[in-house]
Image: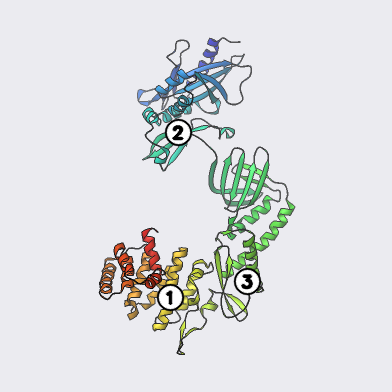
Amino acid sequence: MHTNTMKERLTVYKISTLAVSPSSHLIPNIPVGDKDVSFDGHIDVFSDNSEKKVNFVGKVPVQVKSTGVQQFSNSNITYIFEMADIANFFKTGGVLLFVGEVNENGEVRLFYKPLLPLEISGILKDFSGQKSRTIRLRPLDETKLYDLCLNFLRMQQQQPLAIIQHKPYTVSDFNSYEISSLGIINQEDLFKEQFALYGIKNNVHIPLSLATLEEIAFDRNVKYEVGDKEYQLFTKIQIQDSNLTLTLEDTFEINIDINKGKFTYGHLEVRTISAQLKLQPFLFDLFSGLEIQFLGQSFELPVFTEVIEEWERHQDFLDDLQSTFSFLNINPNLKLRYDENLLWQLHHLVNLVLHKDYSLVKNFNFGFFTIDLDKYKLVFLKMNGELHNAFSSIVTSLDVEIRCTNGERYKHSPFVKLEESVLATAINLNIEEVQNSFDLFDPFVNETVHIYTDDFCIKCINAYSISGKVELLELANYIYDKSNGTDVEKMESMIVNKLQIKAWKGEELTKEERRLLMGMRRDAIVNGKHTLCACVSILLKDKDEVSMSIDALTSEEQTILKEWPIYKLHLKELGE
């Protein structure tokens, strides 16, 4: 066996040989024998091979150890270093450790460990009572010595001793972070390796701590190739230890245990019709035993005959659902939470729409009829023994009249009978058809018609406050605009309601609108119109005046006001 001096000399020679190779941009200065305290030398790093002073990048301090072996290690190795040396490494901003395995033939395999202030600080804190510490090193042949030295200097600059010693920042001080590692990390070591965690402010990296990955997750459009077919699927990929999880189109999940060669699969609870239809051809191929290639990987499942038969039945059902959704003008990207109840609702819906199965309809008295679908509503009109999509041209063109007690009749929209809860949750709501129905008559022709129209618009605004559907505000505004150029446009209630729509949409009042409202409030105060004063003050965001106006109302008047959407607007402004 070789002497310790010979092993050290062979190891230093191996490092120096790598450093002086063509295009290395390095100059090694690692003597054998006399050494500095805790250090065995350094490697000068240049930006090119000219070795000019102007191209000098920095100096990497090194410590070199060696050990004799019968056979080279196939992976990482460990080596014991003295804590006194590690403390000195911290004082000088880190060190690049080398350990050479030397076999009987004098051949050397090098291993390395960049030890920087952030990691050294943790070692000194956690193992202060010990005289030595075991350090894990990686094979140098997995990377290039120049890249290793250059990255060492870069990360050394990002870890100033003053910040690491005094810790002026915490993780919560940052909104943006970065993790970094000096070396090449193999997949099997990915969740064992410690990374440097930096907080980023104004493009400056602030060292915070060391971090260990618990999982890796990313998403992107992935190309899957099956024979001569190609699928582009949005895929979320999670890697944790030996487990790989693929989530396809936010709809279907495949879990693969790489070590055990096992997998599980299933639909996610929340999904859309469009995503399921997009995935079906791919899933047929997947469970038909065909090889799937993606991201440079491939896998092949055995043939699942029962699953394929189930998929075929599901495909027929999805096709029926697509036709049903299209007929009812339902967005196929609507997210639904699938459980046994929803599946029953969907089957019932298909039977009702495509097969006219009305067995669950109790009677066919003329009027609107709703059915539940998850947390939503579907609205139909019962007419002549059939159900029609409530928001279709057939319903829009119906000749509907308001019958007054005095026998008078006035034309109106069939939709005025819909409740705000239905407007808020109806997924087959077609705003254009509702607008068309109000185009067929004058919604402000007289006081009676006006009252019904205003009531419907208020329900639209209330429905918006429940659902957040901006199109409901647009619908109310569309109807109110039909008063433009008439005396109705100048009515106090019309002004308040049109301006509250603007406020709900987050738009600021113009100077002219504010002057108009302040004039209305003065008149309201003089005439004792406390409800009007409260409404106007809400629009002016005058909280004190709102409070005083409400206090002036009777308890009955307060109850009525608090049911109006403008009072909900007030609560929203208060953050309640």
**In the rendered image, which residue does mark 2 sit on?**
209
Residue 509 in view (yes/no): no
Q: Secondary structure at mark 2?
A: strand
**Amino acid type of the residue tagged 1 in the rendering:** Asp
First of labels 2, 3 by sequence position: 2
**In the rendered image, which residue does mark 3 sit on?**
353
| Way the structure is coloured | rainbow
Q: CA distance from mark 2 to mark 1?
A: 61 Å
First of labels 2, 1 by sequence position: 2
**How many neighbours does mark 2 have within 10 angstroms: few (below 14), some (14-19), or many (20 or more)?**
many
**Amino acid type of the residue tagged 2 in the rendering:** Ser
Location of residue 544 in the rendering, given as x and y in whole percent from the top left corner? 29, 63
Q: CA distance from mark 2 to mark 3?
A: 60 Å
Which is closer to the viewer, label 2 or label 3?
Answer: 2
Which is closer to the viewer, label 1 or label 3?
Answer: 1
Name the disc covering residue 455, or none: 1
Are the residues flagged by discs 1 and 3 in contact, CB closer than 8 Å? Answer: no
Name the disc covering residue 19, or none: none
Are the residues flagged by discs 2 and 3 in contact, CB closer than 8 Å? Answer: no
Question: Residue at coordinates 31% horizontally, 77% vertically from top-left?
Answer: 490
Question: Residue at coordinates 45% horizontally, 18% vertically from top-left?
Answer: 84
